[in-house]
Image (spheres, rainbow, N blue to C red):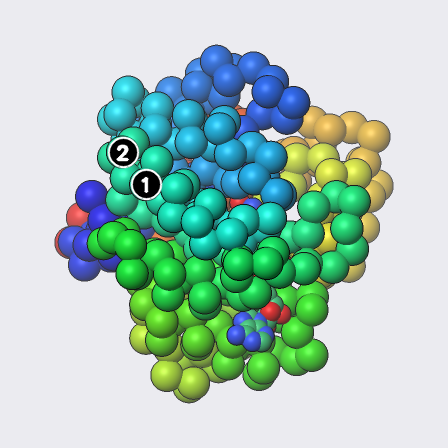
Amino acid sequence: MKIRDLFVENNFVLSFEVFPPAGNGNVENLFSVIDELVKLEPDFFSVTYGAGGTTHDMSLEITSRIKNDVGWEVLAHLTCVQATKEDTAGILDEFKKGNIENILALRGDPPKEEKVFTKTEGGFEHADELVEFIKTRDDFSIGVAGYPECHIEAPNLDIDIMNLKRKVDTGADFIITQLFFNNDDFYRFRDMAVAMGIGIPIIPGIFPILNYKQISKIASLCGARIPSKLHDKIYRVSEKNEEVEKYGTEYALHQSEDLIKNNVPGMHFYSMNKSRHIAQIVQELPLSRKG
Ligand SMILES: Cc1cc2nc3c(=O)[nH]c(=O)nc-3n(C[C@H](O)[C@H](O)[C@H](O)COP(=O)(O)OP(=O)(O)OC[C@H]3O[C@@H](n4cnc5c(N)ncnc54)[C@H](O)[C@@H]3O)c2cc1C
């Protein structure tokens, strides 16, 4: 099913993001986690795509297995990194063959050894070009990324949202945001996006913190601010992952409850390939799903 139709049919669209295990790690462990997450009845899973297509085969395998074997709807991430238009056309054909109907169109981050993104000759400079290209190939439902705290390369939020609008104007159906910890950032971003004429669903991306070092690294890479109260709390227990997880889960639950009160059309959880904390949050949420 196309994700754009889920937003029409359902009051609330719930999704969980997973990633291919590093270094071709244990895919079966991931599928045990997916089996647990399925019990929470998400509307779809999303599967990330590694820099430079490093996880291409694994992303495709996992995406296709979720869709065709587990029998759950899926959103395949796809980036422009180190890919020509021909490469991208080939990947889209593979997705099509694998029965995949939904793509999250991303520019992608530069590969590890490079500091800035460089367009591949014959490829794409920005995600809006990828959206435009996908539209010429097949009738995929297309999502794009949004940044409540502004993308790290953009000079300011106004310009970043103008660039987001290009992705919408070329055919995106929905937006999933980067992780953030202060809901006011999300509300400001949403208000600005709507004021600039963006009318498609904007789904907040929620990252329940499990580990101090991990979140410090991720937040600095993507430019997300950790509010000082939250930071101090998890820093104090940073050596005790169970306590960090407990507090991170509570924080994400409160964040989610507030977002629901403020009428978000769905929620996207960065699961980090774990299920217990996601279950603790989702089971507590007052979700009315079907339209
Ligand atoms: C929900 C979500 C999932 C993600 N999944 C992955 C993943 O699976 N794999 C991965 O490698 N990365 C992933 N990322 C990270 C993403 O690839 C990076 O944030 C990347 O740096 C930007 O990608 P983008 O699609 O937002 O790029 P773009 O929309 O191209 O934006 C990048 C920058 O260029 C500017 N810009 C955009 N269009 C134009 C234009 N036409 N002219 C001038 N400037 C422009 C923007 O303001 C921004 O500063 C994900 C991010 C999110 C929020």
Query: Is residue 222 positioned above or below 243 on the image?
Result: below
Badge number at residue 93: 1
Is residue 241 left or right of 131 when viewed as pictured? right
Q: Do the residues labelled 1 and 2 touch (CB within 8 Å)?
A: yes
Which image quarter holds the N terminus? top left
Q: In which quarter of the image is residue 51?
A: top right
Residue at 56%, 39% in the rendered image = 53
Q: Which amino acid does label 2 sit on?
A: Lys
Query: Is residue 21 positioned above or below 209 on the image?
Result: above
The reply to whether residue 60 is visible in this rendering is yes
Badge number at residue 72: none
Residue designated by label 2: 97
Check the image and name the residue furthest to the bottom: 195
Q: What residue type is labelled 1?
A: Asp
Camera-nearest residue between 93 and 147? 93
Quarter of the rendered structure image containing ligand 1: bottom right
Residue 109: image x %, image y %? Answer: 64, 52
Residue 116: image x %, image y %? Answer: 74, 59
Instruction: Identify the secondary structure beneath mark 2.
Output: helix
Camera-nearest residue between 239 and 57? 57
Q: Quadrant of residue 99?
A: top left
Q: How crowded is mark 2: few (under 14 residues within 10 Å), some or many (20 or more)?
A: few
